[in-house]
Amino acid sequence: MMKNATRASLILAMCLAAPTTSRADSTTYGVLDDGKSRVTFVSDAPLETMTGTTSKVTGKLTVDPADITKTKGSFKSPVVSLRTDNDLRDEHLQGDGWLDAKKHPNIHFEITEVILGKKGSAALKKNKETKVQVTGKFTVHGVTKPVTASGSVKWSDAGVHIKAKFTVTLEDHMISVPSIVRLKVANDIAVSVDLHAVAK
């Protein structure tokens, strides 16, 4: 009996001495249509700077705080929710000559990869911002193109807060700027994303 007790003690000691890996589980977060998230776009043309926004953003995000590079997610906003503080301009923007909301009702972004900086850690630290680059598929006007966004992720008990910026070229999405407004509408549009996601 003494030998059995000794053997059990040795096995227990070996188990305690073995290295263990702590890993947080992946969690699915939802971006809700509650006005807390926002997408902003800026057209900086020679004769006019136009800023538009929407707070109608929905989607989901799967994050493993132990390895942010495994993050997946997709988000969308209705074209009809875009606002530029000019009702007539909004009507034109959403019309068939521009974004064509009837045929292509949503603007969509899907994350394909999260890239860390040279000194970046794959593990998120609670309540600390982590700088990242995100590659994804951006769809507008029915045309999908790859984009690379620079931004940050902050993980907390309240959820995940994402900020990102990237540039969209209208011609890439089969949106032609008429010559009559070419000095007022830029071909390259700066997009900023501010998303708040909560655990589902």
Image (spheres, rainbow, N blue to C red):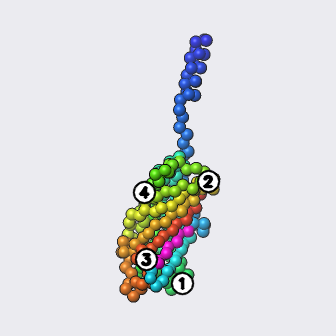
Q: Mark 4 vs mark 2: which is more N-terminal?
A: 4
Label 3 – label 4 distance at C-alpha? 24 Å
> What residue appears at the point 54 percent right and 55 percent down from the top-left corner?
130
Amino acid marked by disc 1: Asn
Q: Position of residue 19 (x, y in %)?
A: 53, 32
> What residue appears at the point 63 percent right and 56 percent down from the top-left corner?
158
Indicate whether 196 appears above or below 89: above
Q: Which residue is mark 3?
A: 99
Depth check: give the residue in front, 1 or 67: 67
Indicate whether 183 appears above or below 144: below
Q: Mark 3 vs mark 4: which is more N-terminal?
A: 3
Q: Mark 3 vs mark 2: which is more N-terminal?
A: 3
Residue 86 circle label: 1
Q: Which residue is mark 2?
A: 127
Amino acid marked by disc 4: Thr
Q: Mark 1 vs mark 2: which is more N-terminal?
A: 1
Q: Which residue is mark 4?
A: 112
Numbered range of the magenta stretch: 38-44
